Image (tube, grey):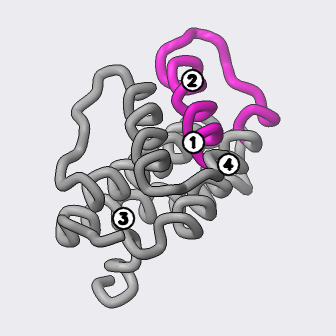
Amino acid sequence: MKNVSPIATQQYIEKADHFLQGMKLLVDDIPAYRTGIGLLAIHSAVSLGDAITIGITGRRGKYQDHDRAARELGKICASHGVSNTKGIDHLSWLLGWKNAVAYEHHRIDNQAVLMAVDKAERFNAWAYNYFREILRVAQGGT
């Protein structure tokens, strides 16, 4: 796989990493930061998915419906011979959980926050395992 937009890819990788590292810093105090941790988990995965998409296609989808981003990533997997799509399942779970975190009136529980952290970390590992050629631009650039 060749990265057709390494500069833009790097920018999304940096965002994803900042979100992920922020999530990891706050996870030890879920009661104080539960909503922030949840949003950081979601946005780390979204930004890393955007990095993959822009690296391969040269463009990032501008979806109000983030589920379309997961479907687009699924198409990329299919067209590039990536048969393990478990990472997309993690991304889809996070995207499905976004409304509960950001917009609904009830409080999310600690278990859900820990699940989101796990899903974000698993998506990150999957992405770097299956799209390392696209995401490797970060190794020399940060």
The CA span between labels 1 and 4 is: 15 Å
- Other residues around mark 4 within 10 Å, as few (<14) / some (14–19) / many (≥20): many
Task: State the residue position of label 4.
Answer: 117
The CA span between labels 3 and 4 is: 18 Å
Look at the numbered disc 1 and give the secondary structure of its residue. helix
Residue 16 % position (x, y): 42, 58
The image quarter containing residue 121 is bottom right
Left of 28 or right of it: where is 68? left
Residue lying farthest to the right in this orientation: 111
Task: State the residue position of label 3.
Answer: 13
Task: State the residue position of label 2.
Answer: 96
Look at the numbered disc 4 and give the secondary structure of its residue. helix
Task: Give the magenta part as a residue range.
Answer: 87-113
Task: State the residue position of label 1.
Answer: 88
Q: Does the rendering let one see residue 25?
A: no
- Other residues around mark 2 within 10 Å, as few (<14) / some (14–19) / many (≥20): some
| Mark positioned earlier in the residue sequence (3 or 1) | 3
Callout 4 touching callout 2 (CB < 8 Å): no
Q: Residue at x 76, y 27 (%)?
A: 109
Residue 95 % position (x, y): 52, 30
| Quarter of the rendering occupied by the C terminus | bottom left
